[in-house]
Image (tube, helix red, strand yellow):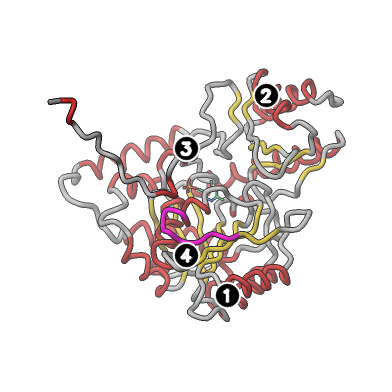
Amino acid sequence: MTADLVRPELPLRPELAGIAPYGAPHLHVPTVLNVNENPYAPSAEVVADIAAAVAEAATGLNRYPDRDFRALRADLAAYLLVESGVGLAPEQVWAANGSNEVMLHILQAFGGPGRTALSFAPTYSMYPEYARDTSTAWVTGRREEDFGLDPDVAVATIERHAPSVVLLASPNNPTGTALPARTVLAVLDAAARVPGGCVVVVDEAYGEFRRTGTPSALELLADHPHLAVSRTMSKAFGLAGARVGYLAASTAFVDALTVVRLPYHLSAVTQATARAALRHAPELMAQVGSLRDERDALVTWLRDRGLTVADSDANFVLFGVFDDRHAIWQGLLDRGVLIREVGPDGWLRVSVGTPQETQAFKDALVEVACLES
Ligand SMILES: *Cc1c(COP(=O)(O)O)cnc(C)c1O
């Protein structure tokens, strides 16, 4: 009988055939500087506050959570007011399990078959995956030699492709480049002229690390209902493990996202965790200040040794240019330092760690690339 069994075929979507799941290599080495995490674990006070908040939430876990997470949205709006000086109503804030899910909601609401999402390369490698998973066409325009975006090139690219969604990472990953307000304004203006409409998402996952004088696109929200500014608690807040991302936009924009989210997508435990961490924003932001200083010092150190380094407004640095970047990457790994082989050919990206981790990176690089110590 078994000989007659038909082996069922799995009807995998053809565009997913042979694709490996996304993810940086997860290796156990002493110095992990490859995924732009905050190197500082939550302090004992933050841990205690989160634990108490989660215990409180646990008493009600027989019930579904507040599916509109109103208290968390109010807390996030209050945080953004302090961080960027921009006042928002809680209804203008949206959150999900990481800004990755926020982006997916955006593509589900505004992308889809027959529509196009556009970004400017090199940029975050997850964007094409959100497009693929929502059957949205994906196109990229180009950034300049210095990884900036020429407003005329951006406008012409938008006019050519008439996308429904434009994604701008600022500060950009993997380059660290922040966009000036006039570039974002040119993109917003071109998007407003796309027939059928186009939303612009400024992904500020690294926004808190921007240098003094670099603006946040939050300042542009009031005049642009087709703009969303996305943030995350994964980087500056040191809460990558909690999975909390959020965005600010017009209420019409946010209302569209409520349609596509799964019911109760943000657990009561997640909501409690995020709110407890937000109560500690001032101390966490002081830590961001020291990471910024470490970043600037690392840029100077690399440049002093003759390397090319992209200006960075983020908690990582893109540097090069190596004939054989893989050999450098491997040499660092052999010395217990994991960084990321990403970006244009010849470049490598290193996250800003603790002073000890940064020193381990420098020591290893001096050996591997034969630099002056
Ligand atoms: C790290 C990162 C994110 C954050 O992702 P989460 O899902 O919030 O952890 C978003 N955008 C960019 C460009 C990033 O590098």
Q: Is mark 1 within 8 Å of ligand 1?
A: no
**Above or below: residue 169 compared with residue 226:** above
Counting residues from the start of the chain, the first of labels 3 and 1 encountered is 3
Report helix, strand or loop for mark 4: strand
Q: Which residue is mark 1?
A: 191
Q: Amino acid at mark 2?
A: Gln
Q: Quadrant of the C terminus?
A: top right
Point out the tag, 2 or 3, that comes first from the N-terminus: 3
Q: Label 4 belongs to which residue?
A: 248
| Disc with the residue nearer the chain's start (4 vs 2) | 4
What's the CA distance linking mark 4 and mark 1?
18 Å
Locate residue 339, reporting x and y percent.
64, 32
In 3D space, how far apart are the residues under numbered discs 2 and 1 (Cα atoms)?
Answer: 43 Å
Which callout, 4 or 2, points to the residue nearer the camera? 2
Q: Nearer the viewer, mark 2 or mark 3?
A: 3
- Viewer-closest of 38 and 160: 160
Q: In the rendering, which numbered label is found on residue 20?
A: 3
